[in-house]
Image (tube, grey):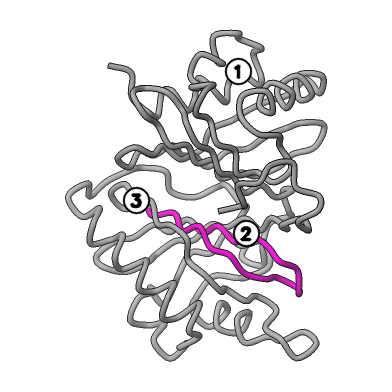
Amino acid sequence: MTSKKQLLMKLLKGIETGDSEAASVVNESKYIQHNPRTGEGSPGLAELFARLAKTNPRVTFFRVFQDGDFAFAHNEYDFNGVEVAFEVFRFEDGKAVEHWDNIQEIQFPNPSGRTMLDGDTEITDLDKTESNRELVREFVQRVLIERKFELMATYLATDLIQHDPEIADGISSLRAALDEEQDGAPRIDHQKLHRVLAEGNFALCMIEGHRYGQHAGLFSLFRLADGQIVEHWTTCTPIPPRHEWKNDNGKF
């Protein structure tokens, strides 16, 4: 039986290869699109693929995961410009029926010299998937959303490996970034956790908030070891105003 990871990769690799079979992964009658800039259903997806096909596209998978009915990936795209993406698909009966993403133009390495995509890739600790999911959920809610920064050491390794392009390694650097304000408001403001997807030692959090005052999707991927978060990747995608949306499903 084809895994959901394989289906996700077949669908997205079709952007690069032009393989007509890639479209067979989608259930056209049920497909729900959550990218506000892409049209509804399979027609919107077909229009997107046709447009991207003209850019000599390249799709590179760095991490691909599966969680129940979901598959999710951490990708690099080159569509006349390199971008980093989190892609999330929900499947029913072997077909993709719902899609979310969060895409950001790739940035220079951060102050610790780390890129938005490098770092650990090995999926381990499958027996700890649920405990890791709950630890990350609690961290995002209590520390990032409720801003109880004094609890950071409960959840984070002191030498946290950081891939946010603006933040260096370590708890202290993250604390400083979260404490920073712009025009009287937090520069990075996490407001609502919509979903946590997990496989083994990795968990992806789909978060809504603001960065630099702009309404955005703030997706964060965490790697865990020995009951702590030890590595973090992120993308920030501005959410366009409602009148610019090409579907009515919402970002989340």
Secondary structure type for disc 3:
strand
**Closer to the N terminus: mark 1 or mark 3?**
1
Q: Amino acid at mark 3?
A: Ala
The segment highlighted magenta reads: 203-220
Secondary structure type for disc 1:
helix
- Alpha-carbon neighbours of circle 3 within 10 Å: few (<14), some, or many (≥20)? many
Image quadrant assignment for residue 112: bottom right
Which quarter of the rendering shows the N terminus?
top left
Q: Amino acid at mark 2?
A: Gly
In x, y percent, where is residue 8? 47, 28
Secondary structure type for disc 2:
strand
Who is closer to the viewer here, 93 or 199?
A: 93
Q: Residue furthest left?
A: 127
Q: Which residue is mark 2?
A: 217
Residue occupying image coordinates x 37% and y 67%: 137
Q: Which residue is mark 1?
A: 14
> What is the C-alpha distance between the residues marked 1 and 3?
25 Å
> What is the C-alpha distance between the residues marked 1 and 2?
25 Å
> What is the C-alpha distance between the residues marked 3 and 2?
18 Å
Image quadrant assignment for residue 238: bottom right
Residue occupying image coordinates x 33% and y 81%: 154
What label sits on residue 102 in the rendered view?
Answer: none
| Left or right of 232 in this view: 153 | left
In terms of secondary structure, what is the magenta stretch mainly?
Answer: strand
Q: Which residue is mark 3?
A: 198
| Left or right of 31 in this view: 250 | right
